[in-house]
Image (cartoon, rainbow, N blue to C red):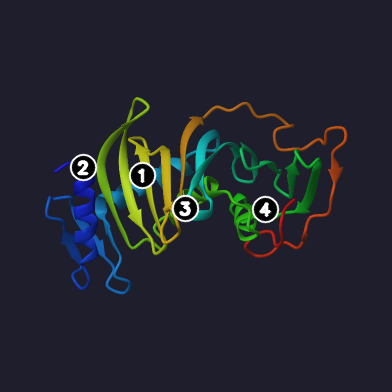
Amino acid sequence: MNRHDWMRVSLAAMALVAAPAIAQDQDGAGLATADAATGRVVTDEARLVLDRMTGYLNGLDRFEVTMQGSRDEVLPFGYKLQNNETARMVVQRPNRFRIDVDGDIKHRSYYYDGSTLTLVAPDEGVYARTAAPDTISGVLNGLLNAGVELPMIDVLRQGFDNSLLDGVRYGLLVGEAPLEGTVTDHLAFRQPSIDWQMWVAGDGQPRKVLITTRYEVGDPQYQATMRWNLKPRIDAATFAYTPAEGMQEIEFHSTTPTQDGIAGGAP
């Protein structure tokens, strides 16, 4: 039995667990903690890897991570196109970040200096500013609630918050897997409408994510690999946007901060 057959058997075995508090799959994958109230089953090994990742992320004061990703676009009759994008995120905790997204679908930049969020759409020649919450998590929550697609950024945010298991029904550690010369722990999880996998290095550094949307034609996927720089060059201009000649400032859809972040949309 290869590692992929083992994973399918393990997930199927965990799916059968209901009342017992502890389960073990037939190949000795390890103990899985079952939540009697929800029926969720996640192996202890998988939880330990995610806890290690959360500890690693929360030990970083500043970092730069470049994410090379692709997303499937499902066309009529189930035909799929793959759209590529690169996202670069520079963070200085607790309340500074810059995100640059450059891809087939869109080009966007997001500057947050602790009090103001600036969103830039260079292809359209416009930018908008709005007052922002005083935490990175609050700003990211606002962007995501406003419909801004930042799937990889959302994964990192949940990693910092240790909330990646929210909504997960089944999860396990598949095993070790080499990734770009590094041995990683390969995790697999199932939620009501998505399956997602994550590869985490031994020190807790996340290296890759794969998200599959189920119950949609073509089962579209999003995946991204991550490269980290723990000593990024940061200066006064990193988190402050200076408009280029010809850029026009437009009104943000809503400038009303909410408890969870920023209400409204983006350019």
For numbered disc 4, what is the local secondary structure? loop
Rounded to the nearest angstrom, the CA distance separating label 2 from label 3 is 29 Å
Other-residue count near label 2 (Cα within 10 Å), few / some / many at <14 / 14–19 / ≥20: few
Q: Which residue is mark 4?
A: 134
Mark 2 or 1: in front is: 2
Residue 120 in the figure: left or right of residue 261: right
Q: Nearer the viewer, residue 194 or 27?
A: 194
Name which residue type carries label 2: Arg
Rounded to the nearest angstrom, the CA distance separating label 3 from label 4 is 43 Å
Q: Which residue is mark 2?
A: 3
Q: Earlier in the sequence, mark 2 or mark 3?
A: 2
Q: Earlier in the sequence, mark 1 or mark 4?
A: 1
Proximity of marks 2 and 3: CB atoms separated by less than 8 Å:
no
In percent of width and height, residue 80 lies at: 49, 46
Name which residue type carries label 4: Asp
Mark 2 or 4: in front is: 2
In percent of width and height, residue 133 lies at: 68, 56
Other-residue count near label 1 (Cα within 10 Å), few / some / many at <14 / 14–19 / ≥20: some
Other-residue count near label 3 (Cα within 10 Å), few / some / many at <14 / 14–19 / ≥20: few
Mark 3 or 4: in front is: 3
Could you tell me which residue is drawn at 77 percent across and 38 percent down?
A: 241
Proximity of marks 2 and 1: CB atoms separated by less than 8 Å:
no
Proximity of marks 1 and 4: CB atoms separated by less than 8 Å:
no
Q: Earlier in the sequence, mark 2 or mark 1?
A: 2
Q: Which residue is mark 3?
A: 78
Q: Earlier in the sequence, mark 3 or mark 4?
A: 3
Name which residue type carries label 3: Gly
